[in-house]
Amino acid sequence: MENKQSWYRMIPKMDFILKQDEMQEAILLYGKQPVMEAVNVRLQAIRSEIPKMTEQSQLEEKLALLETEILEQLEKKSERNLKRVINGTGTILHTNLGRAPLSEEMLQRVFHVMSGYSNLEYNLDAGKRGERYSHFEKLLCKITGAEAAMAVNNNAGAVLLMLSAVASGKEMIVSRGEQVEIGGKFRIPDIIDQSGGIRVEVGTTNKTRISDYEEHINERTGVLLKVHTSNFKLIGFTESVEREELTELGHRYDIPVVEDLGSGILMDLSKFGLKKEPTVMESVMAGVDLVSFSGDKLLGGPQAGIIVGKKKWVDRCKKHPLTRALRIDKFTAAMLEEILSVYEDLDYAREHIPVLSMLTESVNVQHQKALRLVKLCDSLTDEYEISVVSCESQAGGGSLPGEQIASAGVRIWKEAMHAGEIEKRLRGQPVPLIVRIEREGILLDMRTIFEKEIPEAAEILKTVLG
Ligand SMILES: *Cc1c(COP(=O)(O)O)cnc(C)c1O
């Protein structure tokens, strides 16, 4: 016992530790209080271990590692819960994984707006209060051909706002084939009820004709609603009403036509071999009074619910009290302006908006990426069968339903492999790697893995499988 007293005296004092260069650097990085806490935790741990130690060298070893352990602890504590992951699922607009990844260049450009004050609601020419939509409204009108535009927090909010502002208390006519649930509890009938509308369902699940709408129009009718059935595909004996027909009907009876377009795409992707999705321009051209769509689906921007249409109806939305409750922040306003200005040149947009480049990149590019990843995992090939395989990606987020996009991936397999266990460990890494399990093996679809993430993905695979 006598000599252990001197062991305790070998433990350095807080002040001494804090004076070390590494600790001074840590204080600059994390603040003094967290560093002191981490030092205390480590010192307590060492003190509590002394009674169990038999040799003084054991204590010396512990003390030699003291600073490293303090730094490790600080680093671990500063790790955030919400973090970047590598998406190997091949689902481009994965709602669980944050939907549209944003372009780094564009984020750089809005950085200065975020870190300082801005003219978010200040008209610099007039020197008085301005509108937060003013920064992107003209761009949206120019691109879509609409008279006016605005945005709220998300598209679910936009639909609720449009219906509330246009026809609360009145009858809202909607096709039975478009009474859809989008996911996350967003159901069209519930939204109609929420907006104070009286639901009038017309037609049948598979067939709705223009006469079905017309028969139900009366003096209580407030709106004709059209919904893009984003996340499912009706095939076989089906019929729905074209936008042009519906707007003609609405305008004949002086009833506004509102459309929830869901994904809302600003360019025709069919020239890249993808299925034709209705564009926002087509909807505006057809005469729809108000159209809404998401900012973070095929548009490839920040979470938002964008509304474009006739000035009379957009103004009604802008003045509605729900608008204040659903309003966008300065980040969304700045990011929308950034992304929409990129859309002025469609080729440039396709190259610079991550969602669009992922959607339209060729299988060949995916194949090259897969080869590169396989090569970097060379050290694992003794134990595992690692091969480049064909696979299919999807747009996700309710966009392009049923559309399979040919892609290439890396498959990792061995006899009696516990794929589920490995999948779990990959997702437990500091930068989690999210993969698919297919036929007892692990599959990484290269379409959603960025070029710059390939070496990182290889390191993660080697850590877990090596
Ligand atoms: C995705 C979607 C919504 C919901 O949009 P959020 O931006 O997620 O709120 C609403 N309607 C349709 C048709 C959709 O596809």
Image: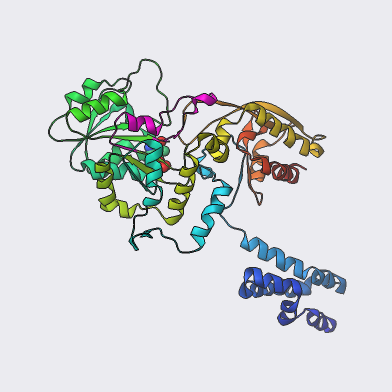
In percent of width and height, residue 73 lies at 68, 65
Front-most of residues 451 and 252: 252
Q: Quadrant of residue 447?
A: top right
In percent of width and height, residue 214 lies at 19, 24
Q: Is residue 440 visible?
A: no
Q: Find the residue positioned furthest to the left.
A: 219
| Side of 398 where 180 appears, left or right | left
Q: Find the residue positioned furthest to the top.
A: 237
Front-most of residues 243 and 414: 243
Q: Is residue 274 magenta?
A: yes
The quarter of the picture showing ligand 1: top left
Picture layout, residue 99 above or below residue 10:
above
Q: Residue at x 37, y 54 (%)?
A: 132
| Side of 52 where 250 appears, left or right | left
Q: Is residue 36 magenta?
A: no
Picture layout, residue 461 above or below residue 66:
above
Q: Which residues are magenta?
A: 262-291
Colour scheme of this structure image? rainbow
In percent of width and height, residue 355 lies at 54, 38
